[in-house]
Image (spheres, coloured by chain):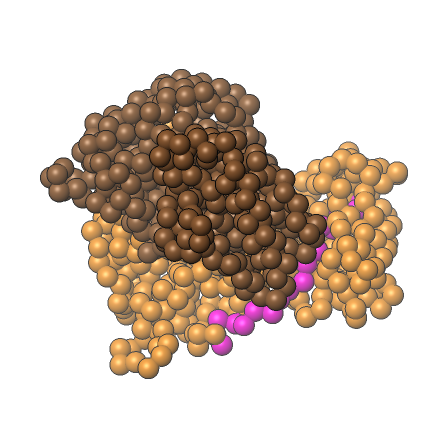
Chain colours: A orange, B brown
């Protein structure tokens, strides 16, 4: 290729895409907000809309990011367990079976009385340490806490199989025995049930829980595994496309996906994955990572949180905060870089959940064309020259615009 | 999902989509007609165009409707026979082989002299009864008349195979012997050939034909099977998406498809499937069905007929009639309903046949976005925020806008 390859930045505004909001005179938060940097990006580049998985499919944050990185989530995905595990920092190896878990409260009859142990906020790190490393019949159980009451469990050993049912009853009733869904998974179900019992006996006597009981708080005296899965090894982006990749992200789930595809994911002080995240710190971290990487990915979670909370005012403010972060990044780029701005899914404030509505996308820099779109929002973007893309087409598109795509044929 | 799921109406204007018409100053019938309700739908919602099967593929009404209901016609479809059979009200069971048939006229040498028996209009019900139920070598042949000279044949028995050639010569020449296209289909071809001979001997002596001969009309003295196929069991929409579905349709082929996907298809007095159809009756039926169903589908055939007739004036009138029907429906909806308006294919008056031209689509209500499109026609719709869809994406898209789509991932 005679054109020098460009570096690439992909900024994913988690759940920022929305629907018309009555209180905003039927504008979306993106349409209602002041966002000069986003609009400049659209004005100087090419826009479109994107079905992150496919039309009518409501993406999870996990499947969405896999698709945005060019992997088919229908092929990669075997339950949420592995992704949560990687997210909390547990290493996953081939053959491991992973589970999402809640710390929960059970009574003496093993009936769940609080699926989130009073949304326990402190002490889970100690509790997790106490129940990690247990060995059962040749299987090692590794446990790591996540945010609040969340955690992940990895079973490691010979002959494990992820096709087992949940221990989590998903409601306030007696905990379930995990059952093998295929005969080969008998060993895994047995090890899992034994682990839950052993962990419960350790948790019951743990000082963190004794303290909680004294304070009248529900003890985190059981873990409830669900969403068993194994990881299908993903060819790292570096091997697939010959690019060094790094990510700036606050939430563990997104961090986990980034690590799965071979990105460097440094911890960024102040990048919390909340609405209180330090946007400047994220911008500075991204700019720093640009020095040593070909592709830098940034996820900002705050829009999704505003969507889940149904808070349209907060969502407008989030747009404006991300816009400032984008301005900082654009201003300090030292070379011609391909910059893409999009969302992993819509989280409309009227729905308070992810929705299947397509998301806007804008790309500028490198070989990006310049169309007539002047604003970055769900409707303006739809008239752009990119048309309507699928999420899995995004990274190849960026590589093309960055003069990094390989010729197919002669 | 915290948003209450919405009900859905899909109105398919069969063949209404068209090309520029010279006599209409290069406008399409949709562009030339007065259609305030359709335009209001576009103005208050989101528009796009749709390749019902795929770019450059001319849809049949059968394959088109399968795609619009979310089924891949390339996978479901094994010849038109089964769909015609279901359309005329013959039950299809697993292992059955079905054929479309014409009542036709042959001379003594079995040469076809009229492939449509003078477009016979009366008496076919009696003729069909006389040749239905014949048993040949363990195979039962069921025959039912369709409209005019049309009918359907179902062979039922052990070891049948649909891979046989047509008896219908498709032109005025000697009838063909059905041949097995694979060795396993020998029994089916033999039974089919024997059936055609037995039916011919019964038809030759039937009073309906004696009467036709007396009147100088060509007798319907043979049936010409073609389009052999079996049915691939379709998972009903109710199971696939958890929705109760009903259809308002006049033509048997469309009714057949609707029944195949598990829709309730009541007979609506006055809904003829012709240009004389009672639009008000269709609107009232649809509104009534909305009380007990999550998804109501309406097919209006008249536009297709005007297209096949090459009658642009009639087509403009059909647009205006459908517009009145739409107005009645929109006016009497008691709640927020997702309403989608589209076509199953184009039938340009200049072509007098189905064409591969994409069709317009507009969706309003529920979570539908609002773009800048102000009119419902082939060109205006193309600038809408939906972009260019495939037919198979339509129902998932409607389910998404109606907050009925399931999340894939976390």
Residue drawn 79% across and 68% down? Answer: A159
Return the x and y of residue A306 as percentages of the image width and height: 47, 39
Residue A138 at least partly seen = yes
Residue drawn 63% across and 42% down? Answer: B134
Q: Quadrant of residue B23?
A: top left
Q: Quadrant of residue B299?
A: top left
- Which of A46 and A200 lies nearest the eye of the viewer? A46
Say left or right for B196 vs A409: right
Q: Quadrant of the N terminus of chain A?
A: bottom left
Find the magenta span and give its range. Answer: A221-239
Return the x and y of residue A298 as percentages of the image width and height: 43, 58
Return the x and y of residue A373 as percentages of the image width and height: 23, 49
Q: How many marks?
A: 0
Residue drawn 68% across and 70% down? Answer: A94
Say left or right for A166 vs B368: right
Q: Quadrant of the C terminus of chain A?
A: bottom left
Residue drawn 40% across and 32% down? Answer: B214
Residue A222 within the magenta-colored segment of the rendering: yes
- Which of B83 and B201 lies nearest the eye of the viewer? B201
Residue B32 within the magenta-colored segment of the rendering: no
- Which of B286 and B220 lies nearest the eye of the viewer? B220
Return the x and y of residue B18 as percentages of the image width and height: 25, 42
- The vertical placement of B193 against A365, above or below, is above
Residue B44 at least partly seen = no
């Amino acid at each position: 290729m005679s054109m020098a390859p460009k570096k690439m930045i992909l900024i994913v505004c988690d759940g920022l895409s929305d629907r018309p909001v009555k209180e905003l005179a039927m504008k979306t938060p993106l349409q209602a907000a002041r966002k000069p940097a986003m609009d400049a990006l659209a004005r100087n580049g090419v826009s479109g809309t994107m079905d992150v998985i496919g039309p009518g499919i409501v993406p999870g944050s996990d499947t969405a990011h896999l698709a945005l990185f060019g992997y088919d989530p229908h092929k990669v995905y075997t339950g949420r367990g592995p992704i949560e595990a990687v997210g909390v920092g547990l290493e996953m190896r081939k053959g491991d079976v992973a589970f999402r878990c809640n710390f929960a409260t059970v009574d003496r009859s093993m009936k769940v009385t609080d699926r989130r142990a009073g949304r326990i906020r402190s002490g889970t790190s100690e509790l997790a340490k106490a129940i990690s490393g247990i060995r059962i019949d040749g299987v090692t159980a590794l446990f790591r806490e996540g945010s609040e009451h969340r955690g992940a469990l990895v079973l490691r050993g010979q002959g494990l199989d992820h096709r087992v049912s949940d221990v989590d009853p998903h409601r306030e009733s007696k905990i379930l025995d995990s059952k093998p869904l295929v005969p080969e998974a008998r060993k895994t179900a047995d090890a899992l049930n034994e682990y839950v019992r052993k962990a419960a006996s350790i948790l019951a006597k743990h000082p963190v829980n004794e303290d909680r009981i004294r304070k009248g708080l529900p003890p985190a005296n059981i873990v409830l595994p669900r969403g068993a899965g194994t990881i299908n090894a993903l060819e790292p982006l570096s091997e697939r496309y010959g690019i060094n990749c790094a990510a700036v992200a606050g939430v563990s789930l997104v961090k986990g996906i980034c690590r799965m595809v071979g990105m460097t994911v440094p911890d960024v002080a102040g990048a919390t994955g909340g609405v209180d995240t330090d946007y400047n710190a994220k911008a500075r971290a991204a700019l720093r990572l640009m020095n040593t990487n070909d592709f830098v990915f940034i996820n900002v979670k705050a829009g999704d949180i505003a969507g889940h909370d149904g808070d349209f005012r907060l969502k407008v403010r989030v747009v404006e905060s991300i816009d400032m972060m984008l301005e900082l990044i654009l201003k300090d780029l030292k070379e011609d870089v391909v910059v893409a701005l999009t969302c992993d899914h819509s989280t409309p404030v009227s729905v308070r959940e992810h929705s299947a509505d397509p998301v806007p996308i804008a790309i500028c820099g490198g070989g990006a064309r310049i169309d007539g779109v002047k604003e970055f929002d769900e409707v303006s973007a739809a008239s752009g020259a990119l048309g309507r893309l699928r999420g899995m087409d995004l990274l190849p598109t960026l590589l093309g615009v960055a003069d990094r795509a390989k010729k197919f044929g002669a």
